[in-house]
Amino acid sequence: MTRQLFDHVAEAYDAARPDYPGELFDTLESALGQPLLRARVLDVGAGTGIATRALAGRGADVVAVDPGPGVLSVLRSRSTSRVHPVLGDGNALPLRDGHFDLVTYAQSFHWTRPECSLPEAARVLHDRGVLALWWNFLDTDEQWYDEWSDLAGLLSGGAYDRAQADVEYAAPARESGLFQWVSTVDLPWRRSVRIDDFVTDMSSHSYVSAMAAAEQGRLFDGLRAGLRRDQGADPVEIRYRTRLVVARR
Ligand SMILES: C[S@@+](CC[C@H](N)C(=O)[O-])C[C@H]1O[C@@H](n2cnc3c(N)ncnc32)[C@H](O)[C@@H]1O
């Protein structure tokens, strides 16, 4: 994978990707045993800063690491002084040992090599620090999603795989032996979004942005038509599930 995979879709990504439910940040505070206010947080694979801003919004001081200079410049332009962007890689963090209360990976851990990124996360956490990995998944049984999944799987040559939503992401952390305990929680939530914005969101996924324009056009035409048929309104309501894996050193 190229390190700048998301740089060319940075604006679309930031404008239209969903954020994360408030309950997720409540759960992080429970796992930490303290509020995020003034916590030292390292957000790895921070991208344009969707999760970074939510963490800083709760008062955390956040170091935001990403290997993409393009996404980091969007992050920099939209962040407060609580956020410190650093160009870097989760597999070899350019940061000192034992400094952070919390290390987060929001939809980014799968881009790293767990055999490198887990020891790196454990190294920069202090004793009893917390590692949190999470992903948003579409969670709907509506027909538009079946149609999207079939066509996206076909046009992406298999790069899109709906079954990824059920991957057990906690296993590498559990098997690493680096953490005292590892647990997984699923948080269901919904968002109301205009169809155009949802199309922009879907266009920022790596398996879509790698497709030729004509193939993307086919996908988006089908998506618009399916959403209009299934929901009959604009904005539409999209159901998500956020899978959160929490591990304590
Ligand atoms: C799907 S985006 C998630 C962005 C952000 N965390 C969010 O909540 O929207 C994945 C991010 O992982 C970054 N990434 C890719 N390889 C990485 C690596 N080896 N180490 C750290 N981040 C990486 C990409 O540059 C991209 O910004």
Image: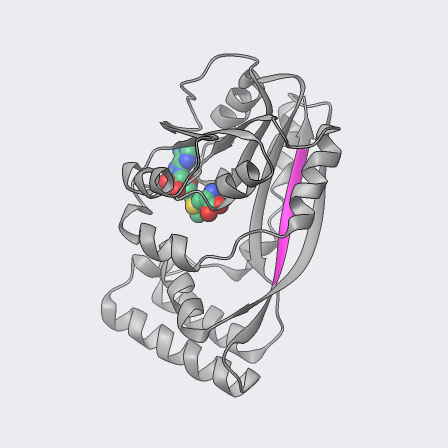
The colouring scheme, among rainbow, by chain, secondary structure or one colour, is: one colour
Q: Quick check: 201 above or below 108?
A: below
Q: Nearer the viewer, residue 227 or 78?
A: 78
Percent of width and height locating residue 43: 50, 33
In the rendered image, which quarter contains the C terminus?
Answer: top right
Q: Residue at 49% x, 84% y: name it.
A: 228
In the displayed structure image, the side of residue 82 where residue 58 appears, left or right? right
Q: Which region of the structure is painted magenta?
A: 240-246
Q: Nearer the viewer, residue 25 or 105?
A: 25
Percent of width and height locating residue 94: 40, 18
Q: Residue at 44% x, 36% y: name it.
A: 80
Q: Main secondary structure of the magenta part?
A: strand
Percent of width and height locating residue 96: 47, 12
In the displayed structure image, the side of residue 184 where residue 19 appears, left or right? left
Q: Nearer the viewer, residue 235 or 172?
A: 235
Q: Quick check: 226 above or below 132?
A: below
Q: Residue at 36% x, 79% y: name it.
A: 221
Q: Quadrant of residue 92?
A: top left
Quadrant field for ligand 1: top left
Q: Is residue 243 rendered magenta in the image?
A: yes
Q: Residue at 34% x, 33% y: name it.
A: 67
In the rendered image, which quarter contains the N terminus?
Answer: top left
Q: Residue furthest top?
A: 97
Q: Quick check: 232 above or below 101?
A: below
Counting every numbered tag in the picture gives 0
Q: Is residue 235 rendered magenta in the image?
A: no
Q: Residue furthest front?
A: 81
Percent of width and height locating residue 174: 67, 31
Q: From where the camera sits, is residue 92 visible?
A: yes
Q: From where the camera sits, is residue 205 visible?
A: no
